[in-house]
Image (cartoon, rainbow, N blue to C red):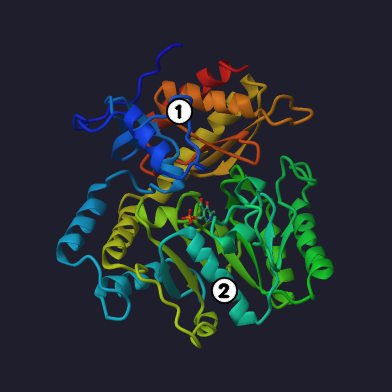
Amino acid sequence: MKTIPLPPCQHQPKKYTGPSAAEILALRKQFMNPGIFLYYKNPIMLVEGKMQYVWDETGKRYLDGLGGIVTVSVGHCHPHVVAAANAQTALMQHSTTIYLQPNVALYAEKLAAKMPGELKVCYFVNSGSEANDLALLMARAYTQNYDVISLRNAYHGGSVGTMGVTAHSTWKYNVPHSFGVHHALAPYPYRGVYGYDDPDAGRKYAEDVKQVIDFCTPGKIAGFIAESIQGVGGFVEFPQGYLKQTYEFVRAAGGVCIADEVQTGFGRTGTHFWGFETQGVIPDIVTLAKGIGNGVPLAAVVTTPKIAQALVGKVHFNTFGGNPVVSAIGTAVLEVIEKENLQANARKLGDYILAGLHRLKQRHKIIGDVRGKGLMLGIEMVKDRGTKAPASAECAQVVETAKDLGLLLGKGGLWGQTIRFAPPMCLTQADADFLLAVLDEAFASVS
Ligand SMILES: Cc1ncc(COP(=O)(O)O)c(C=O)c1O
């Protein structure tokens, strides 16, 4: 295999002196969750990160094309984020919401300022699953309805509540978890019933939500939840007009609209700060996690004052939600995105890479579809462009070859057939060229 040089990097990783990868693997096998999966035939161990790069214990550097699963938004150990975290950790690590604390209130104001319309009340939690659980509770408490519509091919979390709205068998345990949840068609132009060639696909997929309301619920619903681009499902972008029409149907049935921005938020899509804006809608409830904290357990739900009132009758309490340290980090993340124009960078490089992916599609028949927005790009691999049979083994092989060449990528889709690229948004043009060169080589190895 030819070598492709990684762009130069000033950072010198520290010499690693801890246990070997084999020792850590053995510990993990003995003492940790046996159901969790590892990437790669020989799993790699990451011990250091700086901006868009990570290093394994041998000192080998990789371009982090997945950002810890779409989580490292502004860069590993970004100096401004580290400084904010260190300063607050040295001052006061924790207090809880039963006392006043400046960071969390100042952060809530800053986060709310990024939201359109009436979305001005923030709740802080620790993970995307918790945020979505809370959003579902809010929708039900506010509307006094129970039924919720989610989409097939969605991922909203692994808690018992969110497992119900998640719609991939991979993540659903065979226990009761989906009461009142109905899954509408995934608006998936490449694989779904209405394709890219149908200019009316957005309205037609939305019509399915209406059918679910009419045929599967009492006609009144609590809400509709959707990612703005499906993440775990393989970076599936909805046809234009889909959310607008769907929101109309949902609101007409008494429901509220929940946008899961866990992967699509914070400028990643390039053209907009929030993914839902790419469809020209304003949700009633927005859930945030992952990129919000650049890698720390911070998540949030943002809603309107009216909906927030619905939870006032009982106490909604979360021990670490809005902790002073994570609030300082969340604030620093917003500052970096603004100061370093990371949204504009995501747009510029996203467009550049997408054009490169279209060229790769012409060269490699195994690529069935390329899609996405900004720095959230997917490449769906198929054994045959006619049958669209998922090329799962080949996708795993491309990810493996890319790793050997110094690039970490993700996989998505029900069959693990879609390559996901969602790096820290500090990516450079040189990184983009490296990515395209590595992908070309990796696709050639399976063609
Ligand atoms: C779109 C989306 N929502 C929710 C979640 C759940 O987040 P967490 O793993 O922090 O609970 C994820 C996690 O991958 C996600 O991708």
| Dot 2 amino acid type | Leu
Mark 2 falls on what kind of element?
Answer: helix
| Location of residue 11 in the rendering, given as x and y in whole percent from the top left corner | 22, 33
Q: CA distance from mark 2 to mark 1?
A: 42 Å
Corner quadrant of residue 332: bottom left
Circle 2 residues within 10 Å: few <14, some 14–19, many ≥20? some
Judge by depth and name the residue closer to the eye, 267 or 261. 261
Q: Is residue 127 left or right of residue 329?
A: right
What residue did someone put label 2 on? 137
What residue did someone put label 1 on? 435
Corner quadrant of residue 13: top left
| Location of residue 256 in the rendering, given as x and y in whole percent from the top left corner | 63, 73
- Whether tag 2 and tag 1 are in contact, CB under 8 A, the answer is no
Circle 1 residues within 10 Å: few <14, some 14–19, many ≥20? many
Q: Earlier in the sequence, mark 2 or mark 1?
A: 2
Q: Is residue 90 left or right of residue 176?
A: left
Q: Residue furthest bottom?
A: 313
Q: Is residue 210 left or right of residue 294?
A: right
Corner quadrant of residue 170: top right
Q: Residue furthest front?
A: 30
Q: Residue furthest right?
A: 215
Mark 1 falls on what kind of element?
Answer: helix
Q: Residue furthest left?
A: 90
Q: Compared to 166, does 362 lie above or below?
A: above
